[in-house]
Amino acid sequence: MTIRQRYDGVIGWFSDNMPVAESELRYYSPYQLLVAVILSAQCTDKRVNMTTPALFEAYPTPQAMAEATPEEIYKYIKSISYPNNKAKNLAGMARMLCSEYGGEVPSDLDALQRLPGVGRKTANVVGAVLWNKEVMPVDTHVFRVSARIGLTRNAKTPYQTELQLEKNIPSALLPKAHHWLILHGRYVCTARSPKCSECGISAWCRYFSTLK
């Protein structure tokens, strides 16, 4: 099977069977999504969604969060992974958002990455979800699933994975394909004991072909 056949098969199956694929993070504004994505680093969306309602009630706007200390923010996010660092980043992010961007989340990916706590993946997630930017955010699910299926070859870093996926997936599909791979990795192609018998794309999967 050629790499093109593999991509065409996988994209075709997801297009038919998962026409709607969206973030599972709960948010009601660009600011809330940015906060949730920062919190989701090395943490489950489920845990983030349990944490953010009280956080957003306390700090409904960037201006409100900008006035909080990291110690105050920490109290709301202490059940999340790396709460100390994330509390500092959220406080710094909110202050910069207010001082440099008028309290508005910038749509420019480079501008986003200037904010504390926002790296390439976080900026790409926010850009893809809010503005449908044609980018491929790579988290642990995307990295693992892409390699296991055979969409990537010898990609050693998330950035290498990103470049290979962006080269082979039609640009307009990238924001949705990001969610296809995440959701597939979260519920079917799990890190341990992938559910190959339930998988709709096993016919194009390099890993599954080695099991026969």
Image (cartoon, rainbow, N blue to C red):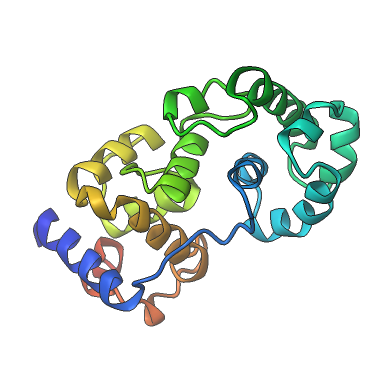
Residue at point 74% right, 36% down? 82
On the image, which quarter does residue 84 sit in?
top right
31 or 71, nearer to the observer: 31
Side of 5 where 115 appears, left or right: right
Write the residue at 64% across / 26% down.
97
**How far across and how far down the image is residue 175, in percent?**
36, 52
Which x, y percent locates residue 55? 81, 47
* Residue 36 rendering spot, x and y as whole percentages: 65, 46
Where residue 72 appears, x then y in whole percent? 90, 33
Seen in the picture, residue 171 relative to 160 is either above or below; the reply is: below
Left or right? Give the position of 31 relative to 122.
right
Residue at image point 66% right, 46% down: 32
Taking depth in this image into account, of 187 and 61 the one nearest to the observer is 61
Q: Quadrant of the C terminus?
A: bottom left
Q: Is residue 211 at all visible to an observer of this figure? A: no
Evaluate whether residue 32 shows in this view: yes
